Amino acid sequence: MAGAPVTQADQERHAAVEAALGTLDLDAKARLLAGQDMWSLPGLPEIGLASLVMSDGPIGVRGIRWTADDPSIALPSPTALAACWDPELARRAGRLLAQEARRKGVHVLLAPTVNLHRSPLGGRHFEAYSEDPYLTGEIGTGYVLGVQDGGVGTTVKHFVGNDAETDRFTVDNIIAPRPLRELYLAPFEAIVANAHPWGIMAAYNQVNGSTMTEHRYLQNEVLRGEWGFDGSIVSDWLAARSTTGALLGGLDVAMPGPRTVYGEALAAAVRAGEVEESAVDEAVRHVLRLAARVGILDGAPAAVTRLPAPVDGAALAREVARRSFVLVRNEVRGERPVLPIAPARTGTIALIGAAARDARVLGGGSAVVFPDHIVSPLDGLSAALAGSGLAESDLAAGALTYSIGADPSGELAAADKGFTLSAVCRAEDGRVLGTATVPGGRVQWAGGDLPDGVTHDELHTVELTGHFTPRESGEHTFGTRGLGGFVLTVGGEVLFDGGQEPGTSSDPFEAFFGAPVERARAELTAGERVEISLLHTVYKITDAPIGAVAFSLLHLGPRYDPDELIAEAVEAARTAGTAVVVVATTEAVESEGFDRENLRLPGRQDDLVRAVAAVNPNTVVVVNTGSPVELPWRDDVAAVLLSWFPGQEGGAALADVLLGEAEPGGRLPTTWPAVLADAPVSDTTPADGELHYTEGVFIGYRAWERAGTEPAYPFGHGLGYTDWEYETIAATTTEARVRLRNTGVRGGREVVQIYLAPVADPAQDPDTVERPARWLAGFASAEAAPGETVEVCVPLRRRSFEIWDERSGSWSFVPGSYKVQAAHSVTDRRLSATVDARA
Ligand code: BGC
C-alpha cells in the first residue's frame, strides 16, 4: 500500500503527520498547498512546521536568489553526467547537491530532469540525460539516492512528456500507451521503484487530452496507485490551472505563490461543495510527509539523521567533467594517436575559439546557477602547461597561443567580464530602500527574494551603477532585457532613455527569458575604466501571480572582421604542433523556453575548423555544447572531443584529458546525427495544439537501426586512451558475465554495454507488435591495468524481456530466443550469447 509505514521512523513520521493534520483547520490546510512566494511554502507555527524551501536544479543549487550574490558549485550538464554511465558517480553528485542545498537552507531540489531525448531539437536536451529510458532511469536513480542521502528531497521532473519546449504550456502530446510506458514513463517508474523519491514535478504540457497537473490517470492511478509513489507532487512553475481539476487530478502543491489556484480558492471550493475536504487532507498528508522527511516538522524524525561525509565540490565537478568527455575520434598521426598531446614532444599548442576563453559551462533557463569561478580551457591549459615540466624557454616562446578565430555569439549577453556593478533600490519619492551587489548585470528578484528592506509595493526604481573596464578597444554595444523604463549612461553620457512594453508572448517568464534589445554603442579603449549606470523603472504587472523584478544590462564586445579572425587563427595554427579549436553553441541556441531550429554551430565556426585543419594535420576539435550539433568537417580533423557543458571546472578537466593526465571516460548517451535531416524524429512543433508521437517506441538508436541510417556517432560510442579485447561472455536470462582484457599500454576504464536482441522467430504470433532490433538491458564499468583481465557481471531484469501490451493494458513477457550482446557501442558489438527466455 502506498505510503504504508514500514520502519520505526516511518511509523513515527506517520503518527506525527496524522497528529499535525488533525489540528489544522481548512484554511491552514489550503494555505499549505500553495506557494507563499517564488520558492517556498508557508510555515505553520501552530503545528511546529517550518517553511519548506525549494530550488533548481539540476547541475547545482541556485538557492532562493536568482543572482550571482550567492554562488553555487556548477556541475557539468545532465547530458554529461549521463555520458559517464556511472550511477555511483551520479549518487556522489547528488550528495554534493544535498550539501549545497543544506548550506543554502533549501529542503527540496527541483531535479532531476528525466524527460527523454526524443528529438535533437528539444531546447532542454542538455538538461535531460539520454534517448534511452533504462540509462535515464539508472542515472536518475543514482542522483535521487545521492540527494536524499543528504536529507534533501528531490522532485523528479517533468512528469511526463515534456520532451520539447515549443508551446510547452499548452501542447497536447499524443502518446500511445506502449511508447508512454516503455519509453517516457519508464525512467520515472524505475526511479520511484529504486530510489523512492520524496517528490515529483507535474509538467506544463498535456498528455492525451489532459493537462498533466490534472492528470488523474497518470498521477493517481499510475504513479501513486500502480507504482506506490508516496511523496508529494508539485506543479511546474505556474502549471496549475484549475482548483478542483488539479486537486482531483492528484496535484498536491501549486507553485509559485502567492496567487495560485490553491490557498483561498481551494478553501472556497471545499465550502462550495466542489471538492471533499478529505481530498485536501490527502494532499496535506503528502506535503507534511515531505516536510517530516526533510526534518522541518517538529516531533517527526527526519529521514536522514547522519549526513554523508563532506564532498569537495570543485574536485567532484572536475572529476565528473573529465569522466564525461566523449572522445569520438582520435586519428593516428605518425606513430601515435593525436590525443593525448605530449607538448614536450609535439611542441606548441595553438588554442583557438571564443569559448576557449569565455567558456560556456552551463545551459540556459531555470538550470542556470552562478559559480564563484569558472575555469576556461585557456585558464586550464595555461595552468597545466606551466606545471608540465616544459622548459621555461618553451613556455616563454609561446607553448600556448590563443586566438579567437570565430565569435559565435554576435549577441548581447548579460554584462559580465570587466564589469563591477551594484544596485540601489529606491521608492518613488527617491528614498533608498536597500542595496545589493549584482555581479552578472542580471537582476532577477522574484517573490520575496528582494534585497533587505525592499518590498515590491514600495520599489520603484533600481539603479545599477559601477564600472566597466573593456578587454578590447573598439565599438562596444549595450542593451537591456526586461520590461519597464531604462536610462543608460556610459562615461557620463546618457546613451539611451526609453522603455520596454510587454510583447504578445504567452510565456509568463518573458521578462526573465525574453529577447535582448540593443540600446546604444560606444567607442571604448582596452584597459580604460569607464563609469556605467542603468536606471530601471520597475514594470508592475497588475494581477501577476508573483511579484518579480527582472531586467539585465547587456553587453557585446567589438565586432571584428570574421575573415580576419579566421586568418589570425590560421597563422597561429600553421606553426603550432597541435591546434585545439573549441567550438560552442550560445545561450540563444541552447536554453529552456524554446526549441532549436537547426543543429548548426552558430557563426563562422565551421569555416574556422576547416581553415585550421587545412594548415595543421594535428587539429583537435573540442565541441562545447550540451546536445548534438552537426560537425560537417568531422572526418577531416585529427580528433574530436565532446565536452558538453562541462561545469565550473571544465577547463581544468579539459587540460587533464588533452594532456593525458586522465582518460576521457564518456560514452554517448544519445545518438549524434551527421545532419538533422537524418534524425528519425526531429519535429517538435505541434499542429492544432497537438504533437503526435507517431514514431511509437522508435526513438534514438531504436529508430536509427530501423531506418538503417548511419549517424555521425552511434549511441554508446566513446574512445579512451587504451584498447580492450572482449574475451568471453556467459549469459542467462538474469545476468551476463563478460571477461575483457586491457590490451593497451595504460590503465583505463571501459563501459561494457549489454544489449538484448530478439532472434526472429518465423513461428511467432503474427499479431506480435514490432520490437526494436535491440535495446540496452544493462551496463557495467571495468577498470584494468595494461595487460590485465577483468570480469564484469551485469544483472538482467525481467522487464527487459517485456513489452507493454496495449490490449490487456499490462506488461507482457515475450518468450523466445534472445541474443545477449556485449558491446562497446550499439553498433560495435563484440560478443554474443543466446538465451532462451521462458515466462
Ligand atoms: C521549469 C522547471 C523549474 C521551474 C522553477 C520552470 O520553468 O520548467 O524545470 O524547476 O521553472 O524554476
Image (cartoon, rainbow, N blue to C red):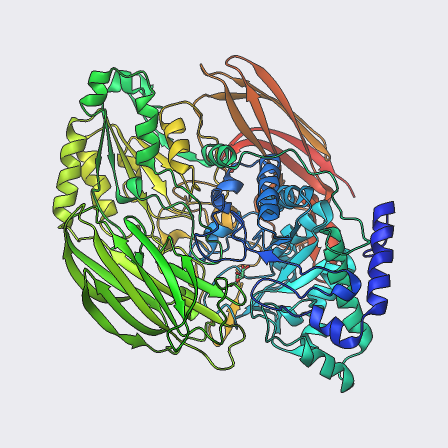
Quadrant assignment for the C terminus: top right
Q: Name the side, left or right, on which 403 lies relative to 597.
A: left
* Furthest residue in direction top, as rendered: 787
Toward which corner of the image does residue 306 lie, by quadrant? top right
Q: Name the side, left or right, on which 68 lies relative to 583.
A: right
Q: 56 and 548: which one is in front?
A: 548
Q: Is residue 99 above or below residue 500?
A: above
Toward which corner of the image does residue 93 lie, by quadrant? top right
Residue 477 horizontal/vertical position (percent): 21, 60
- The residue at the point 48 percent across, 77 percent down is 688
Can residue 411 be seen by looking at this rendering?
Answer: no
Q: 399 and 468: which one is in front?
A: 468
Q: Is residue 590 above or below residue 42?
A: above
Q: Name the side, left or right, on which 10 lies relative to 223.
A: right
Quadrant assignment for the N terminus: bottom right
- The residue at the point 29 percent across, 41 percent down is 357
